[in-house]
Image: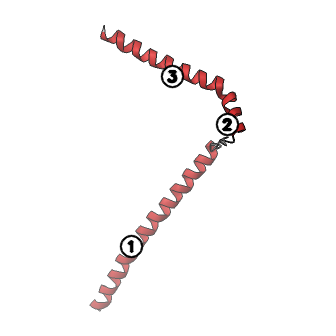
Amino acid sequence: MNNHFHDSRYYLARAAEHARLGVAETLSPYVDRVRSRLGLAVEAESEPSRLEGVRDEAIGLERRAAMRIRGVVGGVRGRVDGGRSSDADDR
């Protein structure tokens, strides 16, 4: 019996969400018209395209890789320079 209540609660919540979306979609043109007349119009931000998202992600990866490489190169240089100074002292 508990499963029946759980299922009915789930479907009721889902139906309420769909009803809310339907009402919002139906009233959207009227809401936009009222907001524009009141001067409260909100400009919709365009979502980045998939290509722009991939490009931004690739640029971020490239920057992180460059930072890691600089860190590794700096560490290697420090070791090499440290080794050279101790070799010069031995001679």
Gap in angstroms between the C-alphas marked 2 and 3: 24 Å
Q: Which of 8 and 29 is in front in this view?
A: 29
Q: Circle 3 sits in a helix, a strand or a loop, which is it?
A: helix
Q: Is residue 90 left or right of residue 48?
A: left
Q: Mark 3 points at which residue?
A: 17
Q: Name the residue under label 2.
A: 35
> Residue 66 placed where, x, y %?
50, 64
Q: Where is residue 28 drawn, in percent x and y?
A: 65, 28
Q: Residue at x 33, y 81 (%)?
A: 82
Residue 30 position in % (x across, y down): 69, 28
Residue named by callout 1:
76
Q: What crowding class fits label 3: few (fewer than 14 Cα within 10 Å), some (14-19), or many (20 or more)?
A: few
Specify whether 3 is left or right of 68.
left
Furthest toward the top, the residue is 1
Q: Which of marks 2 and 3 is nearer the N terminus?
A: 3
Q: How far apart are labels 2 and 1 at the CA level?
A: 61 Å
Q: In which quarter of the image is the C terminus?
A: bottom left
Location of the N terminus (image quadrant): top left
Q: Callout 1: helix, strand or loop?
A: helix
